[in-house]
Image (cartoon, rainbow, N blue to C red):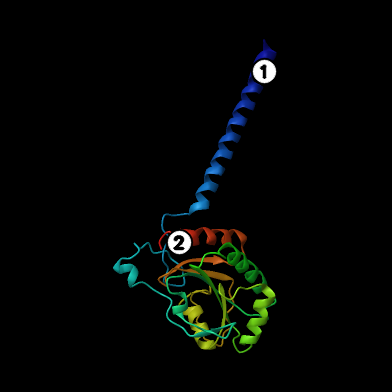
């Protein structure tokens, strides 16, 4: 009788172990399915450097008067003038880079290329990369860089122009730097790995680590969530 009781206890332990494993696998699959849609029903809005989320209802007065990316005038790799009108009724992803960067920029460009491929057939989604060394990154330099990286000119704008304007946009409107409370001016170099998601009304709807594959995957999910608002 003793060995029968011992065998029963072993079988019971195996049964409960298998049951727990099945429940864990099922739970993980459910989490994965939820992440493939979106973290939330509607993405938050942002209006300052701490990126504290604001939950607004689209098309309300609060949303219409909320922080937006202002108009700008820059030049892309084709030599065309790029303004906010270029992005009218578009969702776009913005970052800041420079073509001679030996550090984080190649990885950022690689991940931005992934976004280009993901949304290659979606005319509602554009990409915008600002050069933080516009005095060096002329139109010919940007053209050469675009060709080397497989950048599609109708999809992804590499822009140069007035340094003061670019730095003002990055620091005071896109809030791409993380040095909260540190005063900087245009003489201080702007260098950040962040990607910023902008909706069709020029509002900031997300910030992502442009070096991190998981963050890029979440960005793709969030872009698709924004599409449902159009």
Q: How many marks?
A: 2
Q: Quadrant of residue 55?
A: bottom left
Residue visible at 44% across and 79% down in the picture: 85
Residue visible at 54% across and 87% down in the picture: 161
Secondary structure, mark 1, is helix
Rendered view: 70 above or below 17: below
Question: Looking at this view, is 161 or 121 the one in front?
Answer: 121
Image spot of residue 41 (x, y percent): 41, 54
Outermost residue to the left: 61
How many residues crowd mark 2 within 10 Å: few (<14), some (14–19), many (20+)? some
Name the side, left or right, on which 180 lies relative to 55.
Answer: right
Secondary structure, mark 2, is helix
Rendered view: 77 above or below 64: below
Q: Which mark is residue 6?
A: 1
Q: CA distance from mark 2 to mark 1?
A: 60 Å
Task: For marks 2 and 1, give the one nearer the viewer.
Answer: 2
User: Image quadrant for the N terminus?
Assistant: top right
Image spot of residue 47 (x, y percent): 41, 71
Rendered view: 26 above or below 55: above
Q: Which mark is residue 144?
A: none
User: Image quadrant for the C terminus?
Assistant: bottom left
Residue visible at 56% across and 36% down in the picture: 23
Q: Quadrant of residue 63?
A: bottom left
Image spot of residue 139 (x, y percent): 61, 86
Image spot of residue 152 (x, y percent): 60, 73
Q: Which mark is residue 227?
A: 2
């Amino acid at each position: 009788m003793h060995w029968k009781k011992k065998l029963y206890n072993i079988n019971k332990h195996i049964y409960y172990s298998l049951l727990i494993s099945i429940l864990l696998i099922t739970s993980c699959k459910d989490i994965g399915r939820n992440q493939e849609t979106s973290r939330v029903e509607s993405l938050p809005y942002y209006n300052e450097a701490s990126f504290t989320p604001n939950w607004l209802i689209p098309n309300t007065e609060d949303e219409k008067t909320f922080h937006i990316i202002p108009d700008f005038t820059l030049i892309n790799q084709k030599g065309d003038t790029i303004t906010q009108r270029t992005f009218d009724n578009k969702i776009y992803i913005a970052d800041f880079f420079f073509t001679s960067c030996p550090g984080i920029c190649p990885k950022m460009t690689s991940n931005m290329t992934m976004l280009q491929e993901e949304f290659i057939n979606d005319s509602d989604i554009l990409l915008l990369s600002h050069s933080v060394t516009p005095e060096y990154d002329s139109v010919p330099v940007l053209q050469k860089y675009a060709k080397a990286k497989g950048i599609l000119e109708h999809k992804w704008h590499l822009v140069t122009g007035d340094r003061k304007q670019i730095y003002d946009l990055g620091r005071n409107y896109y809030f791409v730097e993380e040095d909260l409370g540190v005063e900087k001016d245009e003489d201080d170099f702007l260098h950040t790995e962040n990607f910023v998601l902008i909706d069709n009304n020029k509002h900031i709807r997300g910030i992502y680590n442009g070096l991190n594959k998981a963050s890029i995957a979440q960005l793709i999910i969030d872009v698709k969530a924004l599409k449902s608002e159009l």
